[in-house]
Amino acid sequence: MSDIDGTDGDESLREAVERSRSGAPAVGSVVRDRFSSDEVFQRIVAAADEEITSGARELFFSALAAGFAITITFMLYVSMKTSTDSDPVLSALLYPLGFIYIIIGGYQLYTENTLPPVALTLERLASVPALLRNWLVVLTGNFTGGALGAAALVFGGVLSPEAGTVAAEIAREGVATAWWSLFSKAAFAGLIVAGVVWVEYAARDTISRLVVVYLAFLAIPLGGLYHSVVAFTEMTYLALHGDLALGVGLMEFVLPVLLGNTVGGVVLVTVVNYFQTTEERLESARFEGAARQLSLPEWALGSLAGRSYVPLLDTEDAPVVADDDAYRILVPILNPRTEGDLVRLAALLASEREDAVVSPVHIVQTPTDRSRYGSTERQQVVEESNKLMADLAEVAAEYDIEYESSTVVSQRSFEALFEVARRNHADLVVMQWDDDRVWGAARANRSLSDLTRELPCDFLVLKNRGFDPSDILLPTEEGQNCELSAEVGRRLRDAVGADLSLLHVVDSAEDRPAGEQFLERWAREQQLEGATRTVDDSGDVEAAIAREARSRSLVIIGATERGLLSRLVHDSLNLAVIDDIECSVLLTERATSRSLSERLFGRR
């Protein structure tokens, strides 16, 4: 978990009162040893970022471990009831142990997740679908771990016959409880658990956390309350004994407890903890504060409407106001010292359009554990970025184009690229791909395959070996990606007078006439009639490209499959010729969009 102090460098009134001019306590011998409500909120937001952006695999297995830990609670509770003749106090003494493992160990428990991710959602920093996805994965992991633990108790001979009888009685008692009573008792348990989370982030040492967790969870059995994961484990235990139908147990026992825990936890966050913080809580937890919140459609629909999450660190030194009529070329920059050719390529493409805007964006990737940023550090990042980007501005100044630069600071540089492209309504992204594959090292909230299946605009990916657009080779085939290659080649021809050569590969000499007809028609449709046309009948596309590229300065290749960027990241692009030839290669891929059914159910 990460901390965020979150102040702008100024001491709060409380801190000012507590300190004398010499720095000694100004109010007796007591120095403030607890966080303010705003500071607690900021710590929770930092923790929520880790949870809401974790991959499904990480969340699931962390939640699975928590489900196993809950089995320990159930086992100890049953064993203590058996050995103490069901004494209500003594039998509950070891009940909190499983929860202590979970809280101190940092595992994912569903009831604990009713607070941190909800804090992000209330601030419109995470969408409702992102919250529900987090809950669903954690709940699935918890229930899976609880079910496996219950199976071990039933079939592993862990419990004595007497303890097994008591375990079944506990579960029957829960199933026999009225639906509304279960809901109400579970709501109080939800209040307790969410309160534990808040107090946990207010604590400054592990001993305090242990005491709070122990006392709080001790209140659940002593108060006759219900916890959803414990209830699921009890229900599964009874069902595996053959004394309860699984469907009945889920609907009449687990469901009301689950709803009660959820409502109780969310109410505590919304009514008590969240609204006791000040209006400055978000300004200190996010750059630009409320100005960077999700829109209402994004908040309600998530990625269906655009973004689903606002990154922890994201600042622009010159915020771009997108003009819907402008043709915006976005140039993501990782190293301004070595990527000047990207800006030059974008400027050449923009120079042939009156309405084009070139927008280099310096994406500064921070370490994954960096969640503490004050205004001083923010300003330092922007100032240093401005210095580095100055040379790129000089490159753009050579062309009569509109130029806007900005800086984005993010832990997830690859995903930040997509977010900036959508936010600025980019029409084209021009990016560089190096052998070290820096883009592929970045974490992403959404999977790379999901990101790259829905390109927000056209993409050009440059494998740069000395950018020279004077002599261009265009391999051709049917498809919108090759049409984009033709468009780029046409613009470079008009901008610098480049020589264009078209290549089409057929399977055999018998296919050559058809290939020549195709190439003639394709050149006419793409307004490239003056280009040199070559038909290769070897049937080997990559070998033909390699031969023709020997005397060229640039090869422009349209993606042959969907997901070009994903395959580049995973180093699985089936185009070995990119590494075989000596000149620069420019890969192109048209913007893609998914239907509603694809968004909801995945690939077609």
Image (cartoon, helix red, strand yellow):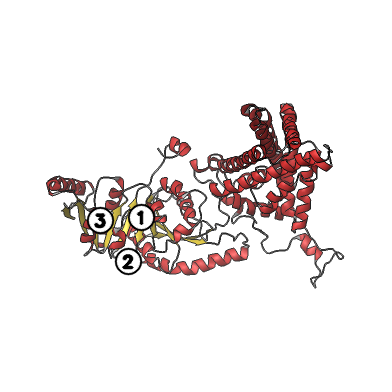
Q: Which residue is mark 2?
A: 465
Q: Secondary structure at mark 3?
A: helix
- Are there few (<14), some (14-19), or many (20+) residues within 10 Å of tag 3? some
Q: Amino acid at mark 2?
A: Arg
Q: Quadrant of residue 436?
A: bottom left
Q: Indicate the quadrant containing the C terminus: top left, top right, bottom left or bottom right.
A: top left
> From mark 3 to mark 1, how far is it between C-alphas?
20 Å
Say which label, 3 or 1, has the lower sequence index. Answer: 1
Residue type at numbered disc 3:
Glu
Name the residue nearer the viewer: 19 or 356: 19
Q: On the image, numbered disc 3 is attached to which residue?
A: 542
Q: Residues within 10 Å of mark 1 (few under 14, many from 20)?
A: many
Left or right: residue 148 compared with residue 555: right
Q: Is residue 45 visible?
A: yes
| Marker disc for residue 460 | 1
Coordinates of residue 181 in the picture (x, y in percent): 75, 29
Q: Write down the quadrant of residue 544 in the picture.
A: bottom left
Q: Is residue 98 left or right of residue 501?
A: right
Please, what secondary structure does the residue beneath circle 2 have?
loop
Question: Is residue 125 at least partly visible in the picture?
Answer: no
At a point 71% along the width and 47% down the height, the residue shown is 99
